[in-house]
Image: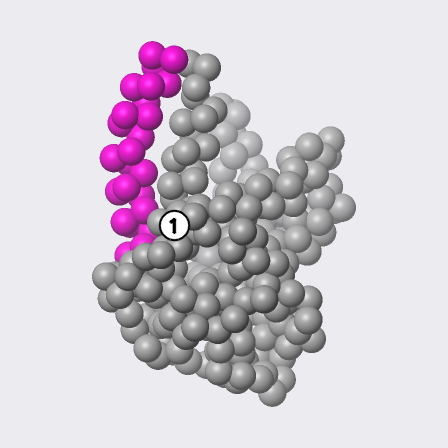
Amino acid sequence: MKGWKIFVHSVRLVLNNIGPALQVSLVLYLVQVANQLVLFLNPPVETVEGFPVMTPGMAGTSALLGLLSIVASLWIAVAWHRYVLAEEAPQGWLPRWHGSNMLGYLGRSILIGLLIALAVLVASVPAGLVMVGVPSLAGVMFLGLVGLAGYLFFRLGVMLPAAAMGRPMKLTEAWAATRDSDGAVVLLALIVIAASVIVQAPSWLNASPASVVNLVYVVVTGWFATIIGISVLTTLYGHYVEGRAID
């Protein structure tokens, strides 16, 4: 049940350090979700054909906020990894800027994303054939593809905390570091996917998805999901690369 222990340890990292977690991420998280808030206040206008379209001004604003959101998310991730792994405590409401580490984090995130997309694309061919032949297995095949993506992400994801720490890892090194953890990583991926669905379900089932209450719920739960997700990668790196205990 090591996968469960990794998840619980990651949640405890946040709950036991809620003050520093907020210091590291709160201001930056508001930047990260600014685009979401602006679109809520200025929803796209529907055309005659029924398609939502932004005004040119809103499109430019949205693009700028989207770019700032990426920077903010990288800043949060690097800062939280460094707080947990290097005890780099925040001195105010903005953590230290580690530009080169953030660029390395971005590059490795893109690389991992491309590899996962390729693997899922290849796996979707036989899965698609099974779904065509046996439609009743469509749900199982889809879950399998999602599980594959989660498994690969967590196997390779230790590269990300390494980048945050300024200790870049190669793909082969990341894969080797987690080579004896297949069962734990599969269970961890399933737990994270299930937890994400459970947390997001109330917003999906809300009778008024465009309501302020729903927006607040999504933003608040999104913060916990963000910081706990980063903590999962931190725990994986700390345990499998640095040999830290998770009990």
Instruction: Name the residue: 56% across, 37% down.
Output: 45
Q: Position of residue 86 (x, y in %)?
A: 48, 82
User: How many dots with numbers?
Assistant: 1
Can residue 33 be seen at all in this image of the molecule? no
Front residue (pair 125, 93) = 125
Is 141 situated left or right of 4 in this image?
left
Q: Position of residue 15 (x, y in %)?
A: 68, 66
Q: Relative to 71, is 192 above or below?
A: above
Which secondary structure type mostly characterizes the magenta part of the structure?
helix
- The residue wearing badge 1 is 182
Q: Answer few, some or many: residues within 10 Å of disc 1's Cα (few below 14, many 20 plus, some between 14 and 19).
A: some
Q: Relative to 74, is 23 above or below?
A: below
Q: Position of residue 195 (x, y in %)?
A: 60, 46
Front residue (pair 223, 11) = 11
Is 242 situated left or right of 39 in this image?
left
Instruction: Name the residue: 54% across, 51% down.
Output: 1
Instruction: Name the residue: 64% across, 65% down.
Output: 12
Is 38 situated left or right of 52 in this image?
right
Q: Residue furthest right?
A: 213
Identity, as a three-letter code, of the amino acid under mark 1: Asp
Q: Relative to 179, is 77 above or below?
A: below
Query: Hey, which quadrant is residue 28 in on the image?
Result: bottom right
Query: Hey, which quadrant is residue 194 in on the image?
Result: top right
Instruction: Name the residue: 52% across, 25% down.
Output: 50
Front residue (pair 5, 20) = 5
Q: Please provide the residue range marked out in magenta.
A: 111-134
Q: Dot 1: what SS?
A: helix
Front residue (pair 241, 232) = 241
Q: Position of residue 119 (x, y in %)?
A: 28, 41
Please say whether residue 122 is one of the residues in the magenta stretch. Answer: yes
Q: How is the model colour-coded?
A: one colour
Can residue 95 be seen at all in this image of the molecule? yes
